[in-house]
Image (spheres, helix red, strand yellow):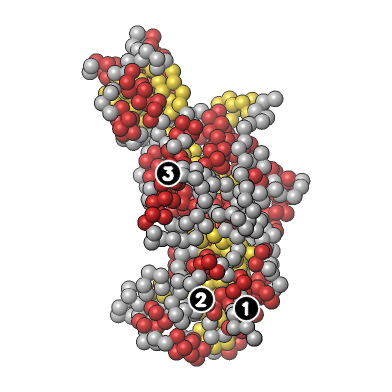
Amino acid sequence: MSKEYFLQGNEAYAKGALKAGCKFFAGYPITPSTEIAEDMARDLPKNGGVFIQMEDEIASIGAIIGASWGGSKTMTATSGPGFSLMQEGIGYAAMTETPLVIINIQRGSPSTGQPTMASQSDVMQARWGSHGDYEIIVLSPSSVQECFDFTVKSFNLSEKYRVPVIVLGDEIVAHMREKIVIPDNVEIIPRKMPKESPEEFLLCKADENSTPNMPVFAEGYNVHVTGLTHDERGYPDTNNPQEHAKLVSRLCNKILKNREDITSTDSYKCEDAEIVLISYGAPSRSVITAVKNARNEGIKAGFLKLNTIWPFPDEEVKKLAKSADNIIMVEMNLGQLVNEVKRVAQGDAKVSLFGKIGGEIHKPLEILSFIKKVQGGN
Amino acid sequence: MSSENPYIKYLREDRLPHIFCPGCGNGIVLNTFFKGMEKAEIGLDDVSLVSGIGCSSRIPGYVKCDSLHTTHGRPISFATGLKLANPERNVIVFSGDGDSASIGGNHLIHAARKNIDLTVICINNNIYGMTGGQISPTSPKGSFGTTAPYGSFEKSFQLSELVAASGASYVARYTTAHALMLTFAIESALKTKGFSFIEVVAQCPTYYGRKNKIKQPTDMLIWLKDNSIFKMQADNMEPKEKEGKIIIGEITKQPHEEYSEEIYKLIEKQYGDKPNVFKSAYRG
């Protein structure tokens, strides 16, 4: 039996985490994500889990990495300024293949910017925020239902690929109330214990492009986990060019080579579309209305909603670039993910950006006018 | 009598030789740690080690147990998560003055305030060794480093007193020239339920010694010994007399409510059963 609720996005994130089996949350108060921490503080103990408020966001991500090696599914939630502080920990988690989930509710930026207003300006930071070559998974919900669903999915992807997964939300969806349906049971991917005995086990031994199983501390595996470049045993081996290339290539390829399994998009009336709009997060809600209105006026418009933004869904966008004349990227920034669309479209379709900053969502009428402008330009 | 080091059994022999310089204080600290651990009747099987960045933070990588070598200054945060996922575990942090007193200062005082059951062993060699001899927040006023070519004019941190004032259950300071007393302090720290902090003032002949004209490790140990005064003595001395001295002994010993125990009690009350954090990720 599933149950219906009328919830705020931030409440749905917390419910999703609990449903996915999150047993450890560490965080630091920050607008507009604080309700997630508040809900976890209230509900985690009731579910047998630990909530801890740390002294800052650097400590928060440190604590969830530590708890992850203690065998727990872990999460933190933050917004831009806190997300900046977490970048060091994200790199460490990527390098050490530590599963964890970060919810980042985007607000107006840069710096402390607009704490109570929405943006989508952390898109590239979510991808490249920590130093070095690494791959990461980022999902972007556009409804309260998706806040729940994508959080559950994030835990599953994080366990499957042993990688930090970021749910890149925005203030609009986080503070919006909608009906959502929470099923009794959701698909849960549990962490896999190594098959080998502790004596035979090597921490980082894995086939090319694959993810090794993860041991837990205190079970006799005697693992050494380090952010330094390490060999199959997990031991530091920092001056060996081949070892570094092998490790970092595997960490990237285990995500990139599984792009098909990881990425998710929804398409609406794209089959015969001459103009395809691409969006993610809150603006998707206006785009769908704009596309419907455009169709009513006889404009062959379609919509591709990106549920996963990293790794970028190359194939889906490439396909549309071949079939459509124009692509319009609608995002709440001055042009971030549009560059990925341009990279993939490669001249097959003309790519335009309808970016907007300041905190207000694109209005459907504004989008319709933009569609007409693009159409008129042909 | 065998000439083999009695603690070699605790080391990852496949990782030797280690990276520490000849005459480094880390070896003394590691030996006293193993001895203190045995005296406290704790087996290495019950221990997880966590460390940050720096020479001292390389220690866990040589010990045959689960270890987490983390980012600079953050080991106490990671250790907090690890401890709360499985409070039955002895979680011990190896850190240094750069790691604990500088970049990780905030984490240190908050863990002490929370009084979470961690043992932090901070090897304070008054300098950044790994990066080649820069001054640290504990470098004595007037000492030299590559970033203080004209001598440091900053006042140094009294790290143990800071941690004691923040609420730790147990704090002791010794030097590598006081190995036996240090062993007993480590034993006490491990037995204490709550946040325990051991500051070991140690020699770094390679950088601190070279920059401050005490190049021989033995001379540095003599300098550490001669420069130390016991806390009992220090308590009856004027501030001026204590300037530049290393105050050794137990700085505080006041066990009180411990964080992981309190939080698990709270969860048990709300959940109506024992918390189920440890290994929960492996359940479907």
**Label 2 crowd (10 A; few <14 / some 14-19 / many >=20):** many
Q: In this orientation, which residue lies closer to the viewer: B134 or A330? A: B134
The residue that appears at 26% across and 26% down in the rendered structure is A347
**Label 3 crowd (10 A; few <14 / some 14-19 / many >=20):** some
In the picture shown, does residue A28 fall above or below B119?
above
Which chain letter goes with mark 2?
B
Q: Residue B187's spot in the image, x, y percent? A: 66, 75
Counting labels gives 3
Q: Amino acid at mark 2?
A: Asn
**Residue farthest toward the right in the current orientation of the protein:** B272
Locate the N terminus of chain A by quadrant. Answer: top right
Q: Closer to the camera: disc 3 or disc 2?
A: 3
- The residue singled out by tag 1 in the image is B6
| Quarter where residue B235 is shown | bottom right
The local secondary structure at tag 2 comes to helix
Question: Whole-Å distance between the Cαs marked 3 and 2?
Answer: 36 Å
Q: Is residue B85 left or right of residue A335?
A: right
Q: Are marks 3 and 2 in contact (CB under 8 Å)?
A: no
The local secondary structure at tag 1 comes to loop
- The residue singled out by tag 3 in the image is A252
Q: Is residue A238 left or right of residue B84?
A: left
The answer to whether one can see residue B205 in this image is yes
- The residue singled out by tag 2 in the image is B26
In the picture shown, does residue B95 fall above or below B125?
above
Give the mark, 1 or 2, whose residue is nearer the N terminus. 1
In the picture shown, does residue B99 fall above or below B153?
above
Q: Do discs 3 and 2 share a chain?
A: no
Q: Residue B269's spot in the image, x, y percent? A: 75, 49
Question: Whole-Å distance between the Cαs marked 3 and 1?
Answer: 43 Å
